[in-house]
Amino acid sequence: MKLAELRRPEVEALDKTNKVALVPLGSLEQHGEHLPLCTDSLLGEQLAQRVEAALPETVVLLPMQWLGSSHHHIRFPGTVSAPSNVYIEMIYHLCECLLSAGFRRIYLLLSHGGNDVPCREVLNRLALAHRDEADKFWIASAGYWALAAEAMRLPEMVTPGTTHACEYETSMVLSVRPDLVDLKRAVSDCFEVDSKYYDPAGGGRNRVHVAQPFEKLTRTGALGRPELGTAEKGERLFAAVVEELVAFVREFSTWERKPQSDG
């Protein structure tokens, strides 16, 4: 069910015990020279809608929250962003509204990597603000690329994982809105570092975190071989990710705190 389409008495009467308020969090930011500014929000909304369609009696879907924390992209024209402190406040109060309405399970579904750290801070603040009743609700946050990382490693994917405006994102946009993609301009660019701990392109498993404004990472605004994207890959990626998201939400709706077993 979709929260925006419910009437107030319906929300009041809703048994929220095992309902999951699903909050898709995207962005409006540059995605190289070949993908639209709405890429993250487009993909996140598609994923959230498919999860709700698969679990209509479990999921209460909120509208896509398109404003993200994207100041690392701000030097690329077209990016619209909330600074991280403002974004934290925004998502914190969004969750507070859901809690005050009686929801006890909230999943922040991220489709923009820049929202990850602010959302973790939101979870920490909410747990402390409600510490006397923090055992009465569950709030989880995860990007689709993290929750479905293994499922997204399809045999046909050449690059090792999702980065930005990459083979993965390009394929997924091609599968749902090919009219918004200009593959002739799909060019990635990134400097390299001789290190086993850090890959600036994000293709490997970084063991340290290094912050870089995005214009210092890439001249084109894209990483991860976007020219390899195809609609066929995108369709398979969507199917794989939705399957993992549905599995998580179904389990999340049943979480209970149980006493630790002996041994």
Image (tube, rainbow, N blue to C red):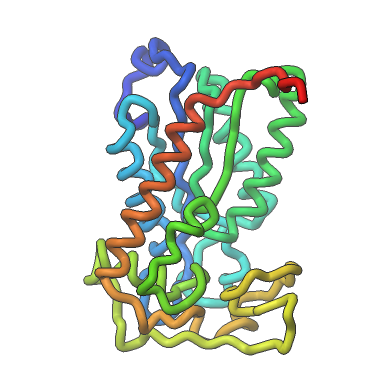
Residue lying at 56% horizontally and 48% vertically, measured from the top left:
142
**Is 75 located above or below residue 246 in the figure?**
below
Name the side, left or right, on which 234 lies relative to 25: left
Q: Nearer the viewer, residue 186 or 89?
A: 186
Q: Residue 17: x percent and y percent?
A: 48, 17
Q: Quadrant of the N terminus?
A: top left
Image quarter where the C terminus lies is: top right
**Image x and y of residue 100, in percent:** 56, 20
Residue 172 occupies which quadrant of the picture?
bottom left
Looking at the image, which residue is at 38% across and 27% down?
58
Percent x, y of residue 103: 51, 22
Left or right, 195 with reference to 51: right
Q: Tell me where residue 229 appears, x and y as whole percent.
A: 34, 76
Q: Residue furthest front?
A: 263
Q: How many marks can you see?
A: 0
User: With respect to residue 7, does 69 lie above or below?
Assistant: below
Which residue does the image show at 64% across and 19% down from the upper left? 136
Q: Residue at x 71, y 77 (%)?
A: 198
Quadrant in the rendering for residue 197: bottom right
Residue 237 falls in image quadrant: bottom left
- Above or below — where is 263 with respect to 74? above
- Name the residue nearer the viewer: 17 or 126: 17
Left or right of 94 in this view: 241? left
